[in-house]
Image (cartoon, coloured by chain):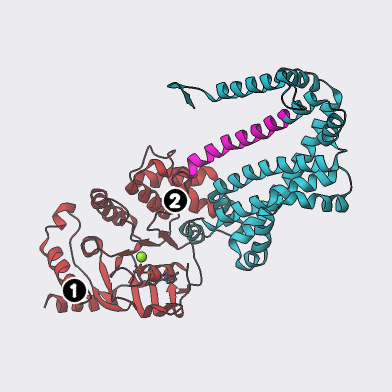
Amino acid sequence: MTLFGYRIPMMASLLVWCLAWEIVGRLDLVFLLPPFSDVLAAAVQLVQTSSWQDATVTTLRAFATGMALAITCGVPLGVLMGRVKIADDLLGMWVNIFSSAPLSALVPVLMILFGFGERTIIAAVFLFAVWIIVLDTRAGVRHVSPSLIEMARSYGATKPALYAKIILWAALPEILAGIRLGLIRGVKGVVIGQLLVAIVGYGALFETFSRNFRMAEFWALTIILFAFAMLIAELIERIEGKVEYYAGARQ
Amino acid sequence: MAVTALREKQSTVHTSLEAIVEVKGICKSYGNVEALRDIDLDFPRGKLTSLLGPSGCGKTTLLKIIAGLIGASAGSVTVDGKHVSGPGPERAFVFQDFALMPWATVLRNVAFGLELRGTGKTEREETARRYIAQVGLSGFEDKYPHELSGGMRQRVGLARALSVDAEVLLLDEPFSAVDEQNRRKFQEDLIRLRSAQNKTFIFVTHSIEEAVYISDRIVLLSPRPGRVSQVIEPDIDRSGDPDSIHRDQRYLDTVEEIWQGLKQYVE
Ligand SMILES: Nc1ncnc2c1ncn2[C@@H]1O[C@H](COP(=O)(O)OP(=O)(O)O)[C@@H](O)[C@H]1O
Ligand SMILES: [Mg+2]
């Protein structure tokens, strides 16, 4: 961003928005929007409470479990679809539908299946994250250079060696891209899941705050969630950068 | 006239040399496309035989059938008397597009054939280093393929094929993606390497000059469907200065003769 010929760094533009929030909050223009400084103060308070810490542990645990499941199912499924035509024909349509469907509508179904607890949240994370991992893995596997595969075969690679030493590595940039997108969708899954279930983790906190009009804490929690999602995306992007470096010269 | 002289020579050489690779009645169709028709060929042990023909005539297809990478529609291939039904340790392939793993160093790429065979890390890396030196890449062991020029990448591919110690080396237009100066140097190196190796080379090319420059025998394939149209043995002395070969009268005559033979297929 440039302003009057000066380059304004990202942080500065963020500051401008925080300032705007502060002013709007102080003027009481918008209902239920406290000044930004109140929200910050509330955030500092919030992270010290045991209810926030417990909620965070529950949320992270559900997120990590759901993501682990999504990755361990999504990658093999994507590899299968990338390599086996019948599997691709059978599953392709469903994966495409699910990856673009409004999955929030399915969360109530998950509640019926898994009950009002952490298992539903885990299932929501899984359901949100898995499809894009499958699709990207499939695309990566499809693009593995045929001559690399022939090379491995010509030097006597067994099937497992072919997958472990060539196909997974050659498809790694796409697999990681899929996982990154999956993580972002997984955050959506955990948030929506908790909001709908509303008795677990952050969902319970959101519920308490909004019902009691504790808006500063409500917004503080929202900001913490956003920061968390951005942090995860940033982290995986770093890893991807390293992998791109090796994959940069893919023939 | 020169042709008949060469043909006579061929028949005498033929009987005196043992064939390591025998191709009998090979046909190959891709759907409706007939790529190869009834190929009968013998490849003598320890010689470099080129498969020469216009692009699309089935050279790569024939080489990959010999490698066991693709199956033939009819016919059979034997190596050392054994029927070929898939890739085997007595054959090693050098790919037109190098087929290097971009995520692995030169050392790991060269050692990869041995890695797949379960050779221990120290042993295979020692072997790999030796062949890296032989192809003139010492000092590049820890580089990645994208840090190398095309010519150097193909040297990695060649070192990988040499390090598995296969008897038969199959090279699919190894120099086609290498720039002109490097190609010339590489061809000289190949002549030097093979005099030290005593291996059988089957070399695919579409360049007449290249084929005549490096081959003991040249198999001319006709355009699709590929058939053997002629076998030529350019009897060129390669022991001296590599540059002198390009001025050798027999070299020049053979190039011209092959060109006259192929001309009919162009246009
Ligand atoms: N996998 C394939 N599927 C269909 N056609 C193929 C395939 N591979 C090669 N061909 C066809 O077979 C013919 C011979 O191909 P190729 O062996 O690559 O020729 P060359 O190496 O001499 O250029 C070409 O016409 C090509 O289009
Ligand atoms: Mg070819």
Chain letter behind tag 2: B
**Image spot of residue A147 (x, y percent):** 46, 59
First in sequence, mark 2 or 1: give its number. 2
Please name the amino acid that badge 1 sits on: Lys
Q: Main secondary structure of the magenta part?
A: helix
Mark 2 on the same chain as mark 1: yes
Mark drawn on residue B263: 1
Mark drawn on residue B124: none
Q: Quadrant of residue A58?
A: top right
Q: Ligand 1 within 8 A of label 1's CB?
A: no
Q: Is residue A243 left or right of residue B95?
A: right
Could you classify mark 2 by the number of other residues whose Cα lies within 10 Å: few (under 14), some (14-19), or many (20 or more)? many
> Residue at point 17% right, 70% down?
B259
**Image spot of residue B104 (x, y percent):** 49, 44
Q: Nearer the viewer, residue A222 or A240?
A: A222
Q: Chain B in the picture: what colour?
A: red
Q: Nearer the viewer, residue B176 or B185?
A: B176
Supply the letter of whichever chain is cyan. Answer: A
What residue does disc 2 label?
B100
A54 falls in the magenta region: no
Chain part drawn in magenta = A223-251
Q: Quadrant of residue A177?
A: top right
**Image spot of residue A21 (x, y percent):** 67, 23
The quadrant where ligand 1 appears is bottom left
Q: Is residue A19 left or right of residue B204?
A: right
Q: Nearer the viewer, residue B162 or B144?
A: B144
Instruction: Say if residue B80 shows up in the picture.
Output: no
Please name the amino acid that badge 2 sits on: Leu
